[in-house]
Image (tube, rainbow, N blue to C red):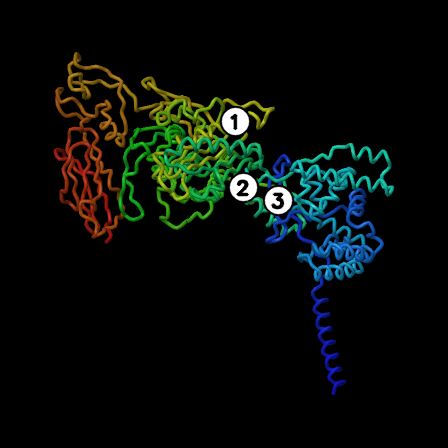
Amino acid sequence: MSKARDHQILAGSGAVAVVVGVCFFASLQTELLLPVPSTLVVDRHNVPLTEVEGGDGDDRFGYWPLPYVLPLRLVTATLQTEDRHFYEHGGIHLPSLARAMKQNLASLRVVSGASTIPMQVARMQSGRSRGLISKIQEAAEAWWLTDSYGHDTLLRHYLTLAPYGARVHGASRAARFYFDKPVEDLSWLQAAWLAGLPQQPTKMSPFTEAGRRRGLARARRILTALHERGYLDDHDLQVAVDSDLGIVDRRPRPDSALHYAMLMSDDVKAARRHDPQLTLVKSSLDLEVQEKTTAIVRRNLDTVRALGATNSAAIVVDTASGEVRAWVGSVDYFDKENHGAIDFNRAKRSPGSTLKPFLYGIALDTQTRPTSHQTYTAATPLADVPMDVVGENGKSYLPKNINKSFLGPMSLREALGNSRNIPALRVLGDVGVDRLLELLDDGGVSDVSFEPGRYGLGLALGNLHTTPEELARLYLALQNGGVTKPLRFSDVDAPAPPAKRLLATDAAALVTDILADDSARQPSFPSGSALDFDIAVAIKTGTSQGFRDGWTVAFTDRLLVVVWVGNHDWRRMNHLGGLAGTADAAHELIEALSPSWKRHVPLPQSLPPPPGSEQRVVCALSGKLAGAECAQHRTEHFLPGTAPRESCDWHRRVDVDIRTGDLASASCPTHVVERRAVTALPPAYQRWARQKRLTLAPTHASRLCGGNTPNDVVEVVLTEPKNGVRYTFDPDTPPAYATVRLAAEVDGGADEEVVFLVDGTPVAQTAFPFEARWTLTPGRHTIQAALLRQASTSSPATILVRQ
């Protein structure tokens, strides 16, 4: 019985041993594991910007490949420091192991590890904590790996994995990190210093005085040992000891460009799908420009914080290459209260008036404009007078300019320069919303919806949200003669899509000329503001509805800047828009950066005329060839085939009865007749002119000279509502608010009265300015305007009120 029990115990013990052995060997790592190398991102001057770790969740950097021939100096110093008997053992050096066990037992603590280079490789691969079991596993793995791969491969692997402080692993990365040179170019002192670093990387950091002293002392000890063993002669030792360590601080500096660093991290990870061994990426960013831009944007924000702004962003682009030189995503990444971690350069916001140049570019583009549309020139008069617009909800509203005033007739140049809303709405209504949407989509604006009625005329005022990055792309195309040019971020950018022409070259040049014209911005923008420069700068501001965003975009022949100011939560600012909120920063950026951009090229004082354009002296008001009676005229550029041929008929001389101010007929006595210069505005401006109390050309004959003449014909025109408009009737809206504007123009009879008729029934009678409101009722209605005392009735307008 006893023998049988002993046999069972032995059998059981054997089984346990087998299981333990199997588990032990199964836990061993018997293959060399090579981590994915990190990727260093440098700025355009090779200054380290950031480093992207190689593996997911791995916060260590390095693991760069070594040269085919391992550097002799580093190999010699490393073997002297870590494993002098490396080529004499099979992974475990038994004498060293015995010595370490004796020392540890004598001290009752671990004072010597006896780890060979293969054992250190095993530990670095496994990441195990130190201990007896771990040491046994490392020894087993060291023997297996050495037997499987050989000494040279194990040494290369060690030099690839070894920790060199500051989260840097591998000798190749460490050489670049500390000395900015290839590992094969290290001096004897640098090689010895680097070889000693893995044992105490934190305590020997060269970025502290104490660490620097410790590291140098250890390096000199290693050099002395090499001299004693014959690797260095007396001369080499003396040169090495006396030489300078040559530390170059190549630590990445992402703090000044954190949003850009994160953007580059995404780009690098995408590039690694095609090149897993990618170790170096050169970005387009210029850290010096970045720091200047950040400082300017921060100072500007500090000056406008009192008006309710809490954040700002900016982009600086080299127009020749499209390379991004500065990318300020917010003024402070770590500002939690104001959500500074948001990259506002990629946040969709209302662009305000910054899209207007592209609308006017379409209007001026003679190559793509449909023949059915009006021909526009920079001198074309546009009506900055009240207009009634019907929204997508079927309700009408009166759009306003930002200063709530109207300037009457103004040239397209002035309308764009002054950034007037009403003229832009009229031009968009003519050229079409879809045409502008196509341009914006082709220009790189994302998420453009072509759903009918999605934007309406509000597109001209910024209801299609864009990012600062997208605005930079659009304006870069404008600066590039109307052709898209990709923004470049680094040498691993994804392939750029084919270039697209957004505008004809001459149209883009003419819009640029307008944006650079200081006089075109008056009177809305005062002379001497931040929009004026001593050099040629095209500049445009924008303010979103409710003063939630302020913008300025400016470009020269060499650089483009976009500046935004606002709040992360779309909070209204206190009447802070583009001019007051961002123009100063844009101006300072242009002046600070332009002189050093192309040192060999003088800064241009003016822009070249649009290619193929003609110059004509035109009336500043009518846009036609200036006549003798035109008090104000300008020299304007006209694209081929668009120059005016007719002389101005807005300014003329007529005979006036000085008693009444009316036209003098042939029956008027000569002593009461005076020939005067007068301004004859089209009917669209009559109401505006009378509201401004302007003196206009008389339109009917003096009654003191014989009564009616052919000039006395008085006509009435219904201006609001427009024919075919549809409204929505809301029964819950109080009748006082469910109204539509009725408006008429009377040509030739300022003292007349107008009667508005709905379905033939008079609903209102009014004198100048001939406006009234009518309460909506469901159904289809015909509306007309008629003169009270003359037989004149307007053409009818049919509207539909849906319930």
**Residue 640 visible, this angle:** no
Q: Amino acid at mark 3?
A: Glu
Q: Disc 1 vs disc 3: which is toward the camera?
A: 3
Label ID, residue 592? 1
Percent x, y of residue 366: 44, 35
Q: Amino acid at mark 1?
A: Ala
Q: Residue at x 58, y 27 (%)?
A: 598
**Marked residue nearer the N-terminal end (3 or 2):** 3
Label 3 and label 2: CA atoms lie apart by 12 Å
Label 1 and label 2: CA atoms lie apart by 23 Å
Q: Circle 2 is placed at which residue position?
A: 258
> Which quarter of the image is occupied by the C terminus?
bottom left
Q: Circle 3 is placed at which residue position?
A: 51
Query: Hey, which residue is sitting farthest top in the picture?
Result: 671
485 or 352, which is in the foreground?
Answer: 352
Q: Residue at x 78, y 60 (%)?
A: 143
